[in-house]
Image (tube, rainbow, N blue to C red):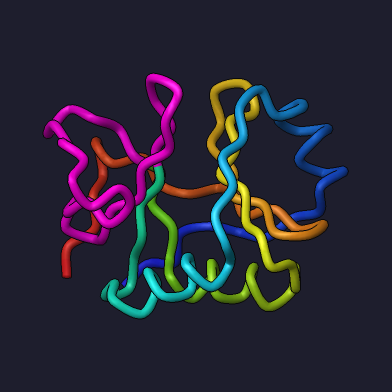
Amino acid sequence: MPTYGRIITVSEADTDFGQPSESYQKTSQHIHDLCNICKGYIMFRIANGKAAIANQNRIPLDPSDATIASTDVFSVYSVSVLEELLSQGSNIYTQIQMRGTTLCVRNGQKIMEYGQLCPPICPTT
């Protein structure tokens, strides 16, 4: 299984992707709980003023009643990298951010980026 995502500092993200234009906050415990029900990968998307989180099969997790079209593009990350972000960031809140056209996930002074876009490449489990 390939690993998607890499952890960088906030200053690196500011330099590489710019300041966040949108940011949606979730508790880190909630994100951790979602990781526990995913099998290897978790997906994030920001569209129309809302953040959405889905599992490796594009089934909505947050909000659980979200409608996901087959053409909706998500950023896919390995659950192991997201768990590492939560551990390194050590903050009770996690932000899902748009920085230009790049989706990032922030916890404390750490940012997870370099995910895989789905489509075109979606995980298979």
Residue 26 horizontal/vertical position (percent): 54, 54
**Residue 112 picture location, percent across and down:** 62, 54
Question: Looking at the picture, how far across and down is residue 61, in whole percent?
Answer: 27, 57
Residue for point 24% across, 58% down? 123
Give the residue drawn at x 41%, y 75%: 33
Q: Quadrant of residue 49?
A: top left
Asked whether 47 falls inside the magenta stretch, the response is: yes
Choose between 16 and 59: the one closer to the eye: 59
> In the rendered structure, which segment of residues is drawn in magenta?
45-74
Q: Indicate left or right for 84 with 31 as reference.
A: right
Q: Residue at x 63, y 71 (%)?
A: 86
> Which of these two is toward me, 61 or 4?
61
Q: Would residue 15 be counted in the magenta stretch?
A: no
In the image: residue 11, left or right of residue 8:
right
Q: Residue at x 36, y 42 (%)?
A: 52
Left or right: 98 in relation to 33: right
Judge whether 32 appears above or below 53 on screen. Answer: below
Q: Is residue 108 above or below residue 125?
A: above
Q: Which percent across, then down, holds residue 125?
A: 17, 70
Q: Quadrant of the N terminus?
A: bottom left
Q: Nearer the viewer, residue 30 or 83?
A: 30
